[in-house]
Image (tube, rainbow, N blue to C red):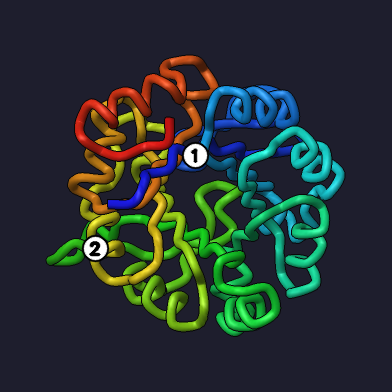
């Protein structure tokens, strides 16, 4: 098994890091530049920055905040939110991102994935997927939602597993799987969703949404088959440190970077 990455996530709204539950009722968690510097020093393997209302507000990402955040980190940085064109991707990479994450724009125009991969390489293109369980289906089934920065977002009609496979075929080099149902609940990742996607695609899958205890991280890897674990609330509000997460996973036989 390759080394499992531990990734803090900065959901940014109006220039501040926020965290909600199931993508609603956001509360303040701090300054993105300060938090980025802190997580860089604490041993995070990567950092993800989402401008969560850029798509729902139909506006560009706040590049000044991105640039100031990028100046503080010396680890891989993924930037997402409001990226609609290949030129938008280029601006983020020039501003300091190592990878760009696309969600709503990719659903609207799947060929954006292919265009980005051709221009910058698949390793730079991350599919950010916000998925919600469909409760009236006979078997486990999840729908992709877009514009999720505002009131839970909009229905896309896309099956999450099918969309994951299509995105990889188009050139996505990684998928961040955000469970809307688990987001902010601290009740654990959606292991069924993670496993369904991990067993379908050949690229790294990042678990997102629901981490609340140390065992949750190990479960995302051992049961959900994730290649990396992403969290926000438990890091922002001091429930656990990155070192505690890594120490626990190492104790469970999961390889992590020291």
**Residue lying at 83% horizontally and 49% vertically, measured from the top left:** 63
Q: In the depicted view, which residue is nearer to us: 228 or 31?
A: 228
Q: Which residue is mark 1?
A: 7
Q: Is residue 164 above or below residue 19?
A: below
Specify whether 56 is left or right of 113. Answer: right
Residue 59: in sight, yes or no? no
Locate residue 255: give its quadrant.
Answer: top left
Q: Nearer the viewer, mark 1 or mark 2?
A: 1
Disc 1 to disc 2, C-alpha distance: 21 Å
Residue 248 at what x, y percent from top left?
A: 29, 24
- Label 1 Cα neighbours within 10 Å, binned few <14 / some 14-19 / many ≥20: many
Q: In this rendering, would 245 be left or right of 88?
A: left
The kind of secondary structure element at disc 2 is: helix
Kindly identify which residue carries mark 2. 196
Q: Position of residue 54 (x, y in %)?
A: 72, 53
**Crowd class of label 2 (few under 14; some 14 to 19; many from 20; radius 10 Å):** some
Residue at image position (56%, 72%) is: 122
* Residue 87, quarter of the rendered image: bottom right
Sequence-wise first label, 1 or 2: 1
Quadrant where the image shows the C terminus: top left
Q: Is residue 79 left or right of residue 94?
A: left
Secondary structure type for disc 1: strand
Residue 215 in sight: yes
Residue located at (47% from left, 63% from top) = 174
């Amino acid at each position: 098994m390759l080394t499992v990455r531990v990734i803090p996530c900065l959901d940014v709204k109006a220039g501040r890091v926020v965290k909600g539950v199931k993508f609603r009722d956001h509360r303040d968690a701090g300054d993105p530049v300060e938090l980025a510097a802190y997580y860089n020093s604490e041993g995070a393997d990567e950092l993800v920055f989402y401008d969560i209302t850029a798509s729902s507000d139909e506006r560009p990402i706040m590049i000044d905040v991105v640039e100031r955040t990028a100046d503080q980190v010396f680890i891989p940085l993924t930037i997402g939110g409001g990226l609609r064109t290949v030129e938008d991707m280029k601006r983020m990479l020039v501003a300091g991102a190592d990878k760009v994450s696309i969600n709503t724009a990719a659903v609207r125009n799947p060929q954006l994935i292919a265009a980005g991969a051709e221009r910058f390489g698949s390793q730079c293109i991350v599919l950010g997927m916000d998925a919600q369980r469909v409760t009236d289906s006979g078997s486990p089934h999840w729908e992709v939602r877009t514009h999720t920065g505002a009131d839970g977002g909009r229905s896309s009609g896309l099956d999450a597993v099918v969309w994951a496979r299509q995105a990889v075929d188009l050139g996505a080099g990684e998928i961040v799987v955000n469970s809307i149902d688990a987001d902010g609940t601290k009740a654990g990742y959606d292991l069924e969703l993670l496993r369904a996607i991990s067993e379908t695609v050949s690229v790294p899958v990042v678990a997102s949404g629901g981490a609340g205890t140390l065992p949750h991280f190990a479960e995302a890897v051992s049961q959900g088959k994730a290649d990396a674990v992403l969290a926000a609330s438990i890091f922002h509000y001091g429930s656990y440190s990155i070192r505690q997460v890594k120490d626990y996973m190492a104790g469970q036989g999961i390889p992590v970077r020291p």
